[in-house]
Image (spheres, coloured by chain):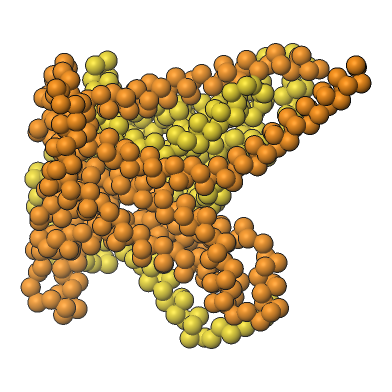
Chain colours: A orange, B yellow
Amino acid sequence: MRPKKLSYAKYGYIFSIPFVVAFCMFTLYPVIFTLVIGFTDFKGLGVTDFHFLSEPFKNFQQILSSPSFKTALKNTFVLWGLNFLPQILLALLLAAWFSGTLFKIKGQGFFKVVFYMPNIITAATIAILFSTLFGYPMGPMNSLLQKLGIIDAPYNFFQNKWWAKGVVSFIQFWMWYGYTMIVLISGILGMNTEWFEAAELDGASGWQKFFYITLPNLRTILIYTLVTSLIGGLQMFDIPYLLVSKSGPNNATLTASVFIYNQAFSGSYMYNRASAASMIMFIIICVLSAVVFYLMRDKYEAAAQKELKRAARQRLREEKQKARTGA
Amino acid sequence: MKKLNVSKGFLAMVYIVCIFLAALSIMPFLIMVINSTRSTVQIQQQAISLIPSSHLIENFKILTGKAFNPMRGFLNSAIISVGATACTVYFSSLTAHALVVYNWKLRQPFFTFILAVMMVPSQVISIGFYQFMYRIHLTNSFLPLILPAIAAPSTVFFMRQFMLSSLPLEIVESARIDGSREFHTFNRIVLPIMKPAIATQAIFSFVNSWNQLFLPLILLTRQEKYTMPIMVSLLKGDIYKRENGAIYLGLTLTVLPLFIVYFLLSKYIIAGVALGSVKG
């Protein structure tokens, strides 16, 4: 039986070929190409030839000392933080309510469907919708606030940099808290119910159970959510690009991705600088990805690895034994 | 079931918060849909109304009289999304099949590699990607938006987990005894077993591809190639400056297909999100 099984191993390689080829062509090669361009003088529409710079790191130095890249990087983190903090808190609260150890909420299915809905709608559409809703001088938000008597005259929201930032963050929050909530609920439902029952027998209150059982056991999922959200947040493009024209007052909503897009594709065609900026972002994201990788590896691979080692040891022992009996 | 220490006031607060959040999710879209039936003059007099009006056709004429072409955008987006989704689910299943069914030397390293590249960001390598496509004359083609979907690490991961739990390897072996060739076995026997996983991943892959803006925006410069999200971005420009009714209608048209997909499949989508998260 054994030699026959071995002969099928080649199909493992053959069936992996499409993945490997597509990956090398559309991911690996572009990564290397982007990196290379970062060290050259490559710019201009329709130009295809470029030369390496005599000072190889000039583009990187220029980008790192450029005030607008610094602003973009800072904005990216600020916009992400402003949306993530309320998002995770609300998602935790809702997850605690919905996972139902204390009480059952009627219409849970409906609420989940509605809370998650904004997540699947095109971000570009949502950006334009909100820029219309917050329109000036006439827009639904302005007319609502005037009717409620909160303001007397129409307010131009996107002329204020904190309003501009706030609306971008709010949209991100609004699009993602439902997703995070569902992720956390499935995490809570996956927990061992005996823990909760034991705590109940010991007279723990709902809050105690939440803080001493639910939260500590959600740790891995929370870190995973945090890091994946940060990786997504660092690439934030659609909303800030379309919500406020020209990135708002003082580049209030200029993010790293919008910066890269502006450098390379709108007017200036500075591919070399855009590449340098991209690579800086790439490295930041790779470091964060490493965290996700270790989290996942811990769970799945450590177990698999252990099993493999055990099997190998077993085989070794058997062979030794065979050798001994043979001798 | 004992109902311990939950007061009526607390429960009321829970419902108020939930209803408020539900309204927050629905209101923007409700305003959008209703305003798409109202004339620009009506909207300017009163920006919010709960009563639809009768200017839908008029708005549609204004909208399509300019650059916005909903049919074109819809068709282009559909071609790309269907193509990309088909590539993703088929080749991810094939790769997962290679990882699960065969015992090859590089199997474990290859799986580790897939985990490692799961998060490679597509946007920050866009300059190299664009330049590569420019050189092989594939800008303004849909291929660069479809073919990369062949290598979808997170889908491979999901398919592998599903296969490990629901594909009995005896089936593959008995197919071999019956003389079925490996590729044939995969297409005729393994793929049908994968149907539930394929359905879940297809939904997410489709929505993802449909909503993409960045790559299409840099690759597609000719107007007849525009996808729906690029069409939407036209609504922001000067050409529709004073035509609020038409803008709302344009937005409504772009989300309509998504709304239909979502409300038909919401159960599976929510379950899919929960399932996908288990990988965390």
Query: Where residue B109 sits in the image (x, y, percent)?
Result: 56, 28
From what the image shows, is residue B275 above or below residue B205? below
In the image, taking residue A210 as reference, residue A136 lies left or right, namely: left
Query: Where residue A316 sits in the image (x, y, percent)?
Result: 77, 27
Instruction: Locate residue A167: give its quadrant.
Output: bottom left
In the image, taking residue B88 as reference, residue A254 lies left or right, namely: left
Residue lying at 14% horizontally and 37% vertically, measured from the top left: A62
Residue lying at 9% horizontally and 77% vertically, measured from the top left: A152
From what the image shows, is residue A278 above or below residue A151? above
- Nearer to me, A114 or B119: B119
Q: Quadrant of the C terminus of chain A?
A: top right
- Nearer to me, B72 or B213: B213
Query: Where residue A146 sits in the image (x, y, percent)?
Result: 14, 75
Q: Quadrant of the N terminus of chain A?
A: top right
- Nearer to me, A124 or A258: A258
In the image, taking residue B41 as reference, residue B224 lies left or right, namely: right
Residue lying at 51% horizontally and 18% vertically, measured from the top left: A17
User: In this rendering, does residue B34 appear at all?
Assistant: no
